[in-house]
Amino acid sequence: MSTPPSAPGAGRADGPSVRIGALAPLTRPGWAEAGRHLLAGLELAVRDVNEADGIGGRPLELVVRDTAADPQRAAAAVDELAGLGVAAVAGEYHSVVARSAAARADALGLPFLCSSAVLDALIDQPTDWVARIAPAQSHGWRTYADFLLAAGHRRIAVAVRANVYWASGIRVLRDHLAPRGGTVIELDMGALTPEAVCDALVDQRATALLLLVGHPEPAVPLVRSVRRDRRLAEILIGAPAGQPELPEWGSLLGADGTGIPFLRYLPDSLGPLGGRVEKALREQLGVTPSFVGFEGYDTIAVLADVLRSRGTDRASVAASWPHVDVEGTRGRIRFSRTPGIGVWQWSWPPVRVVDRDPASVDRFRIRHRG
């Protein structure tokens, strides 16, 4: 699956294309809606690049591969894309999948600009081949922990399906909350039904329940069960990983899906570029675009700037990360080395804790600023 260059007359780019590999979860069990928003942002930015003379007069082309949230499939896709001669690889949403892609790109000497995956340990050792647009999990989830503390929550339950990403998130929460009097109670969704989770919340006297589980299963039935349990009328449901961000959440849960705070990587208001991109993504997707779409757009904006200024040689692209200075949809993008993170990192995109407004499921309220 490829995104062709702009149609004749749409821009001035001509000649042999400069190819960028794009990874996204476009089918189940991946979060396909997130993948669709990510790909929309990538494609919109490619069209904009090509309407502005491409890369030195050559059109930019996406070569898209569906990861379906499968780490092995992602690694194989990186191998294939490297063989196809792409200048760099971009994208991916799922952290465990992006980790596999990053390791393979590093081994092959192929630049990888990760759009949306936040796991701190995106790679086991420091590398110059990988950079990231999304904030690191430790940064965002500490912000979320601060929100919980400010709201008076000290006994916090997490409904969790074990994997590397959720385990990392629990460590961030526990390390940040414990010195401040907070307790994290783990509820294993591999062993508990939604109804059993409700009983455990009562028994544990939890005041907040965080959804560290997949969407729509088991997140949606779990929310419904908690909302319908009168014993839990006062409990806060939270979703730091951002499940309520995408429109499908609102359509599946309606009013039950409101008032559930999550991390969102958008500023309070968008500037001229962000506003234009928001409008174009809305037209392209037919729904309110998520922050994932903006991450996709910013990824291509960075790569296009690098390819124009440094050329298409892979080593030159990778060597450019510390020199990036690009106006993105959500602020100025520059990469740096961040302690404990082995990739070049934008530190930081805007981080907000928001929820869907109970008065209007399609409206978002800012609850806390990072």
Image (tube, rainbow, N blue to C red):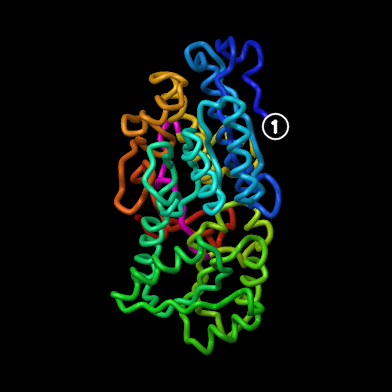
Residue tagged 1: 1
Taking depth in this image into account, of 146 and 287 the one nearest to the observer is: 146
Going by the picture, which residue comes out furthest to the bottom? Answer: 203
Amino acid type, mark 1: Met
In this picture, residue 16 sits left or right of residue 316: right
Give the class, few, some or many, for how many residues have Cα within 10 Å of label 1's Cα (few <14, many ≥20).
Answer: few
Q: Secondary structure at mark 1?
A: loop
In this picture, residue 162 sits left or right of residue 28: left
- Residue 123 on the magenta segment: no
- The image position of residue 295, as x and y in percent, is 49, 40
Taking depth in this image into account, of 47 and 14 the one nearest to the observer is: 14
- The image position of residue 212, as x and y in percent, is 54, 66
Magenta stretch? 260-273
Taking depth in this image into account, of 314 and 154 the one nearest to the observer is: 314
In this picture, residue 16 sits left or right of residue 320: right
Q: Residue at x 36, y 62 (%)?
A: 142
Q: On the image, which quarter does residue 352 sit in?
A: bottom left
Q: Quadrant of the C terminus?
A: bottom left
Up the image or down, 71 lies above or below 336; here it is below
- The image position of residue 215, as x and y in percent, is 63, 60
Going by the picture, which residue comes out furthest to the front? Answer: 107
Up the image or down, 64 lies above or below 250; here it is above
Q: Quadrant of the N terminus?
A: top right
Q: Residue at x 52, y 42 (%)?
A: 104
Q: Residue at x 65, y 62 (%)?
A: 254
